[in-house]
Amino acid sequence: MSESSEKKSAEYQAAVTVKRPMLAMIGLLIGGFVGMLSETSLNIALPSLMAKLNVNVSTIQWLVTSYMLVIGIVLPLSSLLTKWFTTRQLVLFALADFIVGAIISALAPSFAILLIGRMIQGIAPGIILPLMYTVATLIFPPYRLGTAMGMIGLVIMFAPAIGPTLSGIILGALSWHWIFWTFVPFLLIAAFLAYKYLPNVTKITKPKVDILSIALSTIGFGSLVTGVSLASSHGWNSPLVLGILVFALLVLAAYIYRQLHSTNPILNFHVFKKPNFRIGAILIILDFGIIISSMYLLPMFWQNGLDIAVALTGIVMLPGGIVNAIVSAISGRLFDRLGARLLAASGFLIVIVGIVMLLFATPTSAMWYVILAHIIIMIGAPLAMSPAQTFGLNALDVHSTGDGSTIMNTFQQMMGAVATAVATSLLAVGQHASSAPESSRTAFTNGVHYGLIFPLVLAVIAFLISFKINDKSEGK
């Protein structure tokens, strides 16, 4: 067989042969969707939860950041877990864990119990998210990988975008407890589909467990998010905050050094030697920070800045969620035709336009204006996400794809937690800086403007980096 024939054959063959790959992915996709939905599902309820649970904005943010913190702690272990347990075992455990966490949260009588339930839930997406990418890259042939990644992009981008809308509808008719009860039937369906159709696609080798690396990872990532989160209440100049952040960076440096010099690393940071992977990873991390911070600020802006009822808030965010779903669904196919550079650059430029529009929003702005700005952001963010992700992962071979997807997801969640904390901190600074009374709609709007500076900076940086994408380079 000639070299060209071998390449063509490889393009049409998956690494692991599965009769119905789409059906094998459904349970994973539903589980991943619920996991990502949960990241923003409480955002719309935060103002009312602060009153009902008698906590302030700096405390209530932990319901968001703690969830992403646990995901970020579990994610680095996912590659190791796939070498000890079958794909089906991991997915079924994760879904069962999520159900338990959702029930605890639904029954929570206090902030502390609700926080515990949220942290238990965070274990599940920490396992499922990287498995979605790993399974997809193994069971789909290369020529269908862009479409497969588009499906996953739909989960990653659409779920956080639609979370506030679904929660708003639930809160309009019921209480916040039902946000968590709603998760349970979908998780049960996902568990049934995974049990019936999901095969094991990873090789179980049961390598030696590096306890020190696990400890360094947990302490390092945990301290980083804790330090940034405390900045919203203690200030960035606080000795406590600065001390925790310096400690976190030192521990993470030790963790990365250990992984680079280990024969069996928990997380293979050597994948960053591939320039294309580096670019793709940085872009999706920035993109995720944009979507999480904006989805954190917008529901509160609608309620506290524009004085919109909670049920109506969910409805006015629906158009952006629908647009997000459509763009997420087609972005993978567009990548197969147009490549990553054009889509990524266009996507981030569109995001910049949407954020700038929100920076000019006032408490008296027309409803259609804010909806339009939200829609524009929801066009740009998913347009860049899937192409950047596929571009980065395509630079890796089959053996390192799992490590690559795990690293991407780990730093996505860390960015999500950090973005939420930074947005909260800037929100407070903006409220204090306003000449209007701090409790007024004008002061809150000013705080939102300060908070939006963070996703704007991320979008500008991502836009500039996107021009480094070279669609003609392969495996670099």
Image: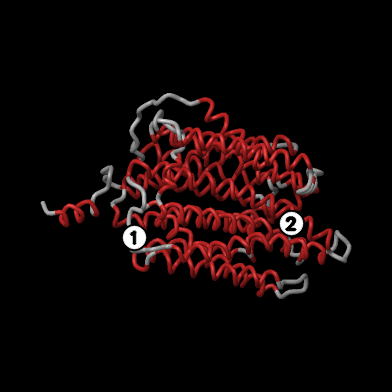
Q: Could you say which is closer to the camera, residue 257 or residue 235?
A: 257
Above-or-below relation of 44 to 374 = above
Residues packed near mark 1 inside 10 Å, few (<14), some (14 to 19) or many (20 plus): few
Point 81% across, 65% down: residue: 441
Q: Position of residue 107 (x, y in %)?
A: 68, 37
Q: Are marks 2 and 1 in contact (CB under 8 Å)?
A: no
Point 61% across, 41% down: residue: 69
Residue receiving disc 2: 426
Residue 92 visible to an observer of this rendering: no
Label 1 residue SS? loop
Closer to us: mark 2 or mark 1? Answer: 1
Residues packed near mark 2 inside 10 Å, few (<14), some (14 to 19) or many (20 plus): many
- Report the side of 308 relative to 341 (left or right): right
Q: Could you say which is closer to the camera, residue 407 or residue 125?
A: 407
Point 41% across, 34% down: residue: 82
- Report the side of 265 relative to 366 (left or right): left
Residue 84 visible to an observer of this rendering: yes
Q: Could you say which is closer to the camera, residue 81 or residue 309?
A: 81
Label 2 residue SS? helix
Which comes before the other along the chain, label 2 or label 1?
2
- Label 2 amino acid? Leu
Q: Quadrant of residue 147?
A: bottom left
Residue receiving disc 1: 473
Q: Position of residue 41 (x, y in %)?
A: 62, 51
Q: Quadrant of residue 357?
A: bottom right
Q: Position of residue 361 (x, y in %)?
A: 72, 71
Point 32% across, 57% down: residue: 474
Q: Residue 286: give its label.
A: none
Q: Position of residue 176 (x, y in %)?
A: 69, 47
- Label 1 amino acid? Ser
- What whole-number distance in Å separates the C-alpha atoms at marks 2 and 1? 40 Å
